[in-house]
Image: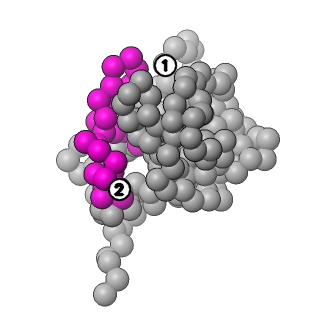
Amino acid sequence: MAPVQPALKAFTFSDGHISFSYPASWSVRTERGPGREGPPRQVEAIVSDRTGSDLFSVSSGADAIGCTAGPAHRTVLDKAATPGMREVDGTTPLFLFIVERITGQDRYAMAIMNPRNLQEGDVGSHCTLLVMGNGGALNRVIFDQPFYPVAKSAFPNRQAAKAWMATEQYAQLKALIMSLRYS
């Protein structure tokens, strides 16, 4: 018997550019992006599960100025094409679940990213900034880990991360990310 698919809701940013689907038992709240005076241009949508735990964040209209990177050793755990998103240069971003070894610790990222983040081995750390027609779009699964300079890993080891990939939560988050559309 096939697993029961959850009922879905749809969310669209007020500017109409980015939309996605998410489980009906989850919720979405929006917040004004940081550091802007006047009318909000960057808006962040934060998706929470039924318990109120924040799971995913995506922004629309960010200042698309770029990312900084440091040395990392990357392993790709999962990847898929995301046909609903296309950067202004025509690049189709990819869904990626990656682990990067940075300063002796594993750091996990799950998001839509530029294909340059597919390269494995010794690389510059990942970036989830996508350059879209209305500015930048940032997105990420919110793992229980603070980012730089001190971070604890989201999983005790890579086997735990791979085991999480077989869970309902992973499937729902991946489906949400894969449903992202830009128009």
Q: Decide whether residue 66 is among the magenta residues.
A: no
Task: Find numbered disc 1 in the image and state the secondary structure of the residue it sits on.
Answer: loop
**Amino acid identity at mark 2:** Lys
Residue 151 falls left or right of residue 117: left
Residue drawn where x is 44% and y is 42% of the image: 99
Residue 138 on image: x %, y %: 54, 35
* Kind of element beneath mark 2: helix
Side of 176 where 93 appears, left or right = right
Image height of 146 relative to 59, above or below: above
Residue hosting label 1 = 34
x and y percentages locating residue 146 in the rendered image = 33, 26
> Image point 35% across, 56% down: which residue?
162
Crowd band around label 2 with a 10 angstrom C-alpha radius: few (<14), some (14–19), many (20+) = few
Q: Name the N-terminal-most of marks 2 and 1.
A: 1
Image quadrant containing the N terminus: bottom left
Q: Residue at x 55, y 23 (%)?
A: 70
Residue on which disc 2 sits: 162
Magenta residue span:
140-165
